């Protein structure tokens, strides 16, 4: 496999105990065809030597911003231009803060600031540092700036605590990197995706809705497009820009979305239901504004059609992918939906305050008949690329 063939990856190693995993990461990146250069920060150098990283990368290791030798050859601008991807692994809380501020006071920070390419961070730190308000604020800033975030994983830590903050394993990081680059895995496939909420009108001024922002579905549309697919996106009302190169249809209610999907489903190779479709709608939308002249108001709701189940029941049918949004027992409910709706694959996410809905990052458990894969917390565009890659693999396996 040559998933990173001809790719230039600048690996930034910052000062955390997980720096000991950097040589294996370099080795695995190179195995997939990448050329790797390493920038080691001063703190990173306290954990691992330049000589080790030079030996595994086959390239001199860069450590100094103000080095006459470096500036004559590969200064921070040249390194930034050279890199298709700057991957910072491990990325400490301190480096996240400096990146979020746009500092340029060491070589790695300056390379990131000068970069016009992709930047990804793989955080690694104590669970308390990860949970802190400051780190979470920096994380949101980085995601808003378009930085990809790989992990962190959860588990026991070098400091003796248990929680979120472990560096993803090198194999997972390499898969995340491969997922960043267009794969042509879905060349010419027709893909129909639903995204966002549906709004169910009660009267001309009020509706029942949900917290979906559409980010997950829009990220999937972009990722499928980048993988070579011809993408149609059917979106509930959201405040997101139209993704370039994707046919976008805007709808409002579950009934609208149902009609739009059924009109376009014939000939589709893949259907992905990422929308948060309302299960119920008011039995009767009032033509006039409902007046508050009663102490109690009872609203009768009726079931909406299950779009995903209808698509999965068609013959012939596309490769059908659902989502499961759950507040508890995520895997049990997701497995049940996979089986009951006869899906090819389901992506399950935990939703609740600040999770899943209307946030920039997410984590998915992906299930299919006889298999399962975890996609650890990352920005929605990163997760979308990983999910599209997995869908392409499962599609091939099912052919
Ligand atoms: O939009 P974001 O803010 O980025 O948030 C992303 C998300 C949390 C909305 C997304 O990741 C997600 O989980 N989408 C599915 C939400 C949902 O409605 O889940 P569900 O478990 O209630 O539904 C299961 C599946 O059936 C979903 O694929 C849904 O699209 C589909 N469905 C549900 C009801 C219905 N009437 N028709 C359907 O097609």
Image (cartoon, helix red, strand yellow):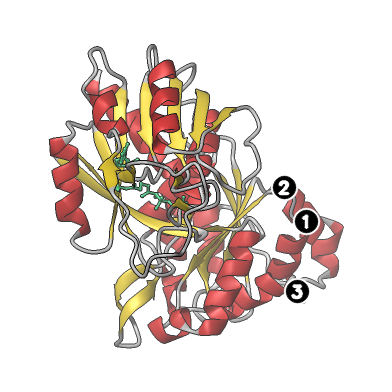
Q: Is residue 148 left or right of residue 389?
A: right
- Report the front residue among 201 and 328: 201
For disc 3, the marked residue is 103
Q: Position of residue 29 (x, y in %)?
A: 47, 48
The residue positioned 51% from the left and 25% from the top of the image is: 232
Picture residue at 29% right of the left edge, 33% below the top: 305
Residue 370 image offset from top left, x and y in percent: 13, 38
- Label 2 with label 1: CB-CB less than 8 Å: yes
Q: Which residue is situated farthest in the front direction here?
A: 293
Camera-nearest label, 2 or 1: 2
Query: To which residue does mark 1 refer?
Result: 74
Q: Which mark is residue 82?
A: 2
- In percent of width and height, residue 140 lies at 58, 68
**Local crowd size for mark 1, using a 10 Å CA cut-off: few (<14), some (14–19), many (≥20):** some
Between 263 and 95, the one nearer to me in the picture: 263
Apparent side of residue 1 relative to residue 326 in the rendered image (left or right): right
Q: Which quadrant of the rendered structure holds the N terminus?
A: top left
Contact, mark 1 vs mark 3 (Cβ under 8 Å): no
* Residue at 67% across, 76% down: 98
Residue 207 appearing in the image? yes
Q: Residues within 10 Å of mark 2 (few under 14, many from 20)?
A: some
**Spatial distance from mark 2 to mark 1, Cα to Cα?**
9 Å
| Residue in front for this viewpoint, 178 or 234 | 234
Q: Quadrant of the C terminus?
A: top left
């Amino acid at each position: 496999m040559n998933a990173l063939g001809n790719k230039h990856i600048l690996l930034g190693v910052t000062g955390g105990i997980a720096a000991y995993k950097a040589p294996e990461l370099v080795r695995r990146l190179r195995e997939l065809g990448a050329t790797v250069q390493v920038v080691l920060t001063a703190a990173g150098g306290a954990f691992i030597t330049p000589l080790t990283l030079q030996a595994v990368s086959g390239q001199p290791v860069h450590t100094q911003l103000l080095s006459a030798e470096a500036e004559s050859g590969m200064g921070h601008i040249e390194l930034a231009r050279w890199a298709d991807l700057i991957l910072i692994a491990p990325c400490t809380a301190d480096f996240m803060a400096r990146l979020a501020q746009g500092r340029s006071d060491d070589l790695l920070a300056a390379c990131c600031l000068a970069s016009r390419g992709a930047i990804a961070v793989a955080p690694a730190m104590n669970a308390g540092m990860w949970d802190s308000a400051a780190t979470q604020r920096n994380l949101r800033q980085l995601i808003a700036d378009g930085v990809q975030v790989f992990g962190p994983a959860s588990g026991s830590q070098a400091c003796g605590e248990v929680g979120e903050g472990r560096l993803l394993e090198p194999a997972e990081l390499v898969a995340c990197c491969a997922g960043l680059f267009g794969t042509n895995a879905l060349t010419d496939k027709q893909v129909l995706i639903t995204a966002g909420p549906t709004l169910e009108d009660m009267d001309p001024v009020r509706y029942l809705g949900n917290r979906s922002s559409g980010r997950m579905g829009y990220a999937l549309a972009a990722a499928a497009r980048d993988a070579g697919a011809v993408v149609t996106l059917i979106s509930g009302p959201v405040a997101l820009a139209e993704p370039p190169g994707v046919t976008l249809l805007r709808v409002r209610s579950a009934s609208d979305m149902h009609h739009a999907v059924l009109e376009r489903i014939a000939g589709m190779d893949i259907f992905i239901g990422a929308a948060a479709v309302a299960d119920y709608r008011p039995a009767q939308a009032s033509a006039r504004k409902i007046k508050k002249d009663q102490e109690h108001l009872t609203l009768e709701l009726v079931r909406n059609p299950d779009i995903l189940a209808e698509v999965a029941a068609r013959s012939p049918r596309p490769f059908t992918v659902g989502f499961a949004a759950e507040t508890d027992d995520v895997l049990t409910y997701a497995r049940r939906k996979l089986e009951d709706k006869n899906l090819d694959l389901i992506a399950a996410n935990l939703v609740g305050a600040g999770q899943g809905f209307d946030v920039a990052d997410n984590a998915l458990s992906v299930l299919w008949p006889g298999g399962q894969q975890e996609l650890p917390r990352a920005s929605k565009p990163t997760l979308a690329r990983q999910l599209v890659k997995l869908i392409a693999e499962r599609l091939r396996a099912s052919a």
